[in-house]
Image: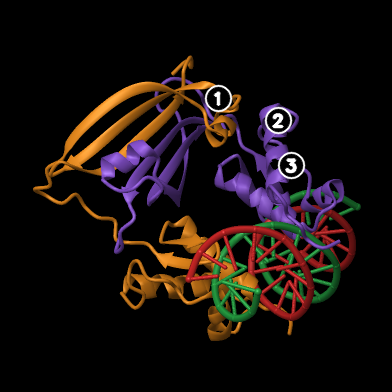
Chain colours: A purple, B orange, C red, D green
DNA sequence: AGAAATTTGTCCGTATGTATC
DNA sequence: AGATACATACGGACAAATTTC
């Protein structure tokens, strides 16, 4: 079969599935995830795709991998009190100005603006989303 | 050809080389890196290895990649310029979640969210607009 | 201690999808 | 619409670290 990835790419679907297994306790903290080979069988994808999914979880600090041993589910991030740990994901994109933004920047509605969106996640779920808008001009 | 990677893996050697080019100004901030294809030719490795090298730089926030465009060297983190005067205007309001925000917060599209909008003005003109979104009820 | 098996790490080549120019 | 460039996915091969026998 070719490689159509309509909607979400497969590696992200797999990453989300593994994430929920960890958060639901199906894969308890500190235990090893199934091996990459086992996951290729379960999800019917190549090893590269599995590795991509695990890499995504690793970026969220949800798992840690050791050469020759395997990939562990990380102990619970403490959700207690101060010192709460959050992960941030930032992306830049061009959006068209809504009427309010257009007025503020003194441009026409629909003009392209640069939007930087930062998602603050705690335990994988978004807690706050920040969007900053700036005019598109060059050189930054 | 086999795959001997004595010492450092190739993707890391390439990442280090690109890093020094950026830091030494050979690739100025804001400009595009050579395309992945060009880099495969220059370093004599496959595209996957080049992508691995660029991914490493991306994790260090040294570059940013845009689908279909290319990979940029990040602008210098600018230190706050002295003497810049800005006025801030902040307002809170309830808005209904667009599909993207709804997905992030795991609520239904249209659910009410708290939006805090801050407008930074310089010389009376808006320079940056920041909008933060949070769920309404939450325990934060 | 040593050898084999297991598991993750690196790298290649190819093909196709998707976004941008 | 065509060309260019990055994104996703496959399958294979070998290297390196760990565990097991």
Q: Chain of mark 2?
A: A
Q: Provide residue A90's location: percent of width, then percent of height.
A: 45, 46
Q: Which residue is mark 1?
A: B110
- What SS does tag 3 mark? loop
Seen at 85% across and 46% down, the residue is A42
Q: Which residue is mark 2?
A: A28
Where C4 sits versus A33, above or below?
below
Secondary element at image label 2: loop
Q: Position of residue B46 (x, y in %)?
A: 64, 77
* Residue A124 visible somewhere in the drawing: no
Residue at the (67%, 78%) spot, across then down:
B4
Mark toward the start of the polypeptide (2 vs 3): 2
* Disc 1 to disc 3, C-alpha distance: 37 Å
Which sits in the foreground, B76 or A102? A102
Q: For mark 3, what is the residue?
A: A33
Instruction: State which chain disc 1 sits on.
Output: B
Residue A73, which numbered label? none
Eye-nearest disc, 1 or 3: 1
Disc 2 residue crowd, few under 14, some 14–19, many 20+, Cα 10 Å: some
Q: Secondary structure at mark 1?
A: loop
Q: Is A40 left or right of B66, judged from the image as shown?
A: right
Question: Where is residue A51 drawn, in percent x and y?
Answer: 70, 55
Q: Are marks 1 and 2 on the same chain?
A: no
Q: Residue D15 vs residue B18: left or right? A: right
User: Does any portion of residue B62 appear in the rendered image?
Assistant: yes
Question: For the residues marked 1 and 2, what is the alpha-carbon distance in whole angstroms?
Answer: 35 Å
What residue lies at 63% left-to-right and 51% top-to-bottom? A55
Q: Are marks 1 and 3 on the same chain?
A: no
Q: Quadrant of the rendered structure where residue D3 is? A: bottom right
Q: Is residue A135 left or right of residue B39?
A: left
Q: Quadrant of the N terminus of chain B?
A: bottom right
């Amino acid at each position: 079969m070719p490689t159509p990835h309509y909607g979400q790419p497969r590696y992200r679907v797999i990453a989300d599935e593994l994430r929920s297994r960890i958060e639901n306790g199906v894969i308890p903290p500190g235990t090893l995830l199934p091996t990459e080979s086992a996951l290729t069988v379960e999800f019917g994808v190549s090893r590269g795709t599995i590795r991509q999914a695990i890499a995504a979880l690793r970026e969220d600090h949800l798992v840690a991998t050791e050469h020759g041993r395997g990939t562990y589910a990380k102990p619970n991030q403490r959700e207690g009190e101060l010192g709460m740990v959050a992960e941030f994901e930032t992306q830049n994109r061009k959006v068209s100005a809504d009427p309010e933004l257009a007025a503020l920047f003194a441009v026409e509605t629909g003009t392209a603006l640069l939007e930087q969106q930062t998602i603050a996640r705690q335990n994988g779920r978004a807690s706050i989303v920040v969007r900053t808008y700036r005019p598109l001009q060059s050189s930054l």
